[in-house]
Image (spheres, helix red, strand yellow):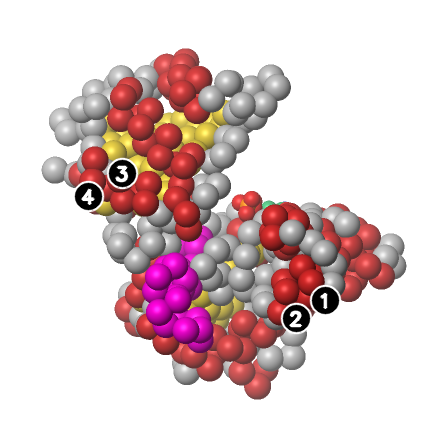
Amino acid sequence: MNPTRVLVLNSGSSSVKYQLLDMPHGERLASGVVERIGEDGGPADHDAAFKLVAGELTDDGVGIDSPELAAVGHRVVHGGTRFTEPTVIDDGVLAAIQELVPLAPLHNPANITGIKVARELRPDLPQVAVFDTAFHTTMPEYAARYAIDRQTADTYHVRRYGFHGTSHAYVSRAVAGLLAKDPSEVNVIVLHLGNGASASAVRGGVCVDTSMGLTPLEGLVMGTRSGDLDPAVVFHLARVGGMSVDDIDTLLNKKSGLLGLCGDNDMRNIGHRMAEGDEAARLAFDVYVHRVRKYIGAYTAVLGRVDAIVFTAGVGENSAAVREASLRDLGSLGIEVDTVRNALRAKTARLISAAGSRVAVAVVPTDEELEIAQQTYSLVEQ
Ligand code: ADP
């Protein structure tokens, strides 16, 4: 029998998450996370972290040396314009991922380390890179370009890449399934609202626009990131506020968004605080939802015809209040939410639109690991 298991590795700067799935059905055989890499109480480095992962898999009776393992699928954050598809990793691919480090200085190095260690542990296995940016490489040039001097942009690879692509791909396809349609038949707005948040416009299964840009800072209001702002804010803070580039980077990426507005980046706490009449929490919620509504309007215009709006990730899957407020009074766009369905808590993909709503509204739990496993397996199955 041919091997059917895929190990999915998501190595971040301080953690390694893993899942072992049996394909093609995606049955989860093991999963876990090794955290605090390089910190007190955690493994010293990624090498040590991967040895822990290998040990945990062996403890689960599904060792990394198992002959049933077909491939390792790696989440890689930045694939630039080069990687439009999942790709079997060889030395050339690894070098190309390395060349993209300036575009993702925190993420790609951790991904590279993960790939190297996994290759050492199982040199016989295909290692596949699945890129966060790949799904968005279909954006038309006019959506991917910033309106700045072309030569400068090209020299420094400044363009809109988009992220969370694995989630947008999975969820846009899943919502087509929920509507009993082929993905090629439906136009979808995906709202991935987690700690990081992004929206995408997907026409017939193909991404035509997304809210994140050169980096994951652009677009929606996030847990700790500002999302869209006038770029002159940066000059102003430097000139008038005397802040350094690094200070401003930290401010916009780590101290802004919901956290910056109200001191809390967890939508659950914001909900509790709002219920107690907390005005800062209310303002943070309103700013967040206002931005989501603007993107829904924009992507409705981009797509022309919208068949479905789908919410996913931590906030999107769990916050009925955010979904309700994001779509309130949009009947003129054909969007009507069923308040009872919206309020129901469930872990499964479901419709929450009212019976007569022209646009279907759905909640679909994202599953990036399953998507990575599927893309990996489709490349290596014999
Ligand atoms: P990440 O981007 O880190 O993968 P998730 O998609 O897991 O994040 O989303 C995490 C966020 O989801 C939390 O910060 C929290 O704001 C939100 N969240 C989780 N559960 C709930 C809930 N029941 N109600 C509202 N928000 C929630």
In the rendering, at what x and y percent does residue 182 appear? 29, 65
Q: At 44% from the left edge and 17% from the top edge, which residue is drawn?
A: 48
**Are the residues at dot 1 and dot 2 in contact (C-beta closer than 8 Å)?**
yes
- Would you say residue 338 sits in the magenta stretch? no
Give left or right: position of 278 versus 292: right
- The first of marks 1 and 3 along the sequence is 3
**Are the residues at dot 3 and dot 2 in contact (C-beta closer than 8 Å)?**
no
Q: Is mark 3 within 8 Å of ligand 1?
A: no
Assign a secondary structure to mark 4. Answer: helix
**Are the residues at dot 2 and dot 4 in contact (C-beta closer than 8 Å)?**
no
- Dot in front, 4 or 3: 3
Question: Disc 1 marks which residue?
Answer: 286
Question: What is the number of the mark on residue 290?
Answer: 2
Q: Which residues are magenta?
A: 145-172
- The first of marks 2 and 4 along the sequence is 2
In the rendering, at what x and y percent does residue 256 appear? 68, 54
- Dot in front, 1 or 3: 3
On the rendered image, what quadrant is the N terminus found in? Answer: top left
Callout 4 crowding tier (Cα within 10 Å): few <14, some 14–19, many ≥20: some
Q: Amino acid at mark 2?
A: His
**Mark 1 to mark 4 CA distance (whole Å):** 44 Å
Res 192 seen here:
no
- The first of marks 1 and 4 along the sequence is 1
Assign a secondary structure to mark 2. Answer: helix
Residue nearest the observer in this picture, 149 or 68: 149
Q: Residue furthest right?
A: 277
In the rendering, at what x and y percent does residue 299 appear? 47, 75
